[in-house]
Image: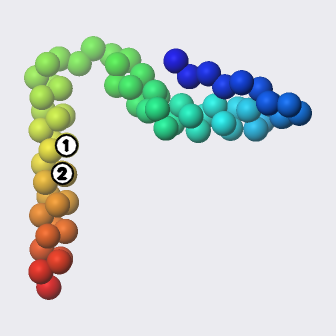
Amino acid sequence: MTTVVLKDRESFDSLLKRFRKQVQQERIMTTVRRRRFFEKPSQTRKRKAAKKRIKSRRTTLKMQRRRY
């Protein structure tokens, strides 16, 4: 769980900014969005496989660029 402690003479805006930054770094919102609705195991496998394909394609392109 993310917690942010108010520092001396800190405005609410800066406190909120620090909180949002910390939430983003911990990837809480992406997890919440993903778990908002039930995802069937087959959909999970398809999503992960698509992610692997994209990552593999990127690394392949990087390797090809280095050769030239």
Quarter of the figure that contains the C terminus? bottom left
Q: Is 42 above or below relative to 11?
A: above
Q: Quadrant of residue 47?
A: top left
Q: Secondary structure at mark 2?
A: helix
Mark number, residue 24: none
Q: Nearer the viewer, residue 56 or 5?
A: 5
Q: Residues within 10 Å of mark 1 (few under 14, many from 20)?
A: few
Say which residue appears at 42% left-offset and 22% top-offset: 32
Say which residue appears at 38% left-offset and 26% top-offset: 31
Q: Residues within 10 Å of mark 2 (few under 14, many from 20)?
A: few
Q: Position of residue 52 (x, y in %)?
A: 15, 44
Left-right relation of 40 to 30? left
Q: Is 60 above or below relative to 20?
A: below
> At label 1, which amino acid type do we have?
Lys
Q: Is 67 above or below relative to 18?
A: below
Q: Secondary structure at mark 1?
A: helix
From the image, tell me which residue sits under label 2.
54
Q: Position of residue 17 (x, y in %)?
A: 68, 38
Q: Quadrant of residue 30?
A: top left
Q: Position of residue 22 (x, y in %)?
A: 56, 34
* Callout 2–callout 1 Cβ contact below 8 Å: yes
From the image, tell me which residue sits under label 1.
51
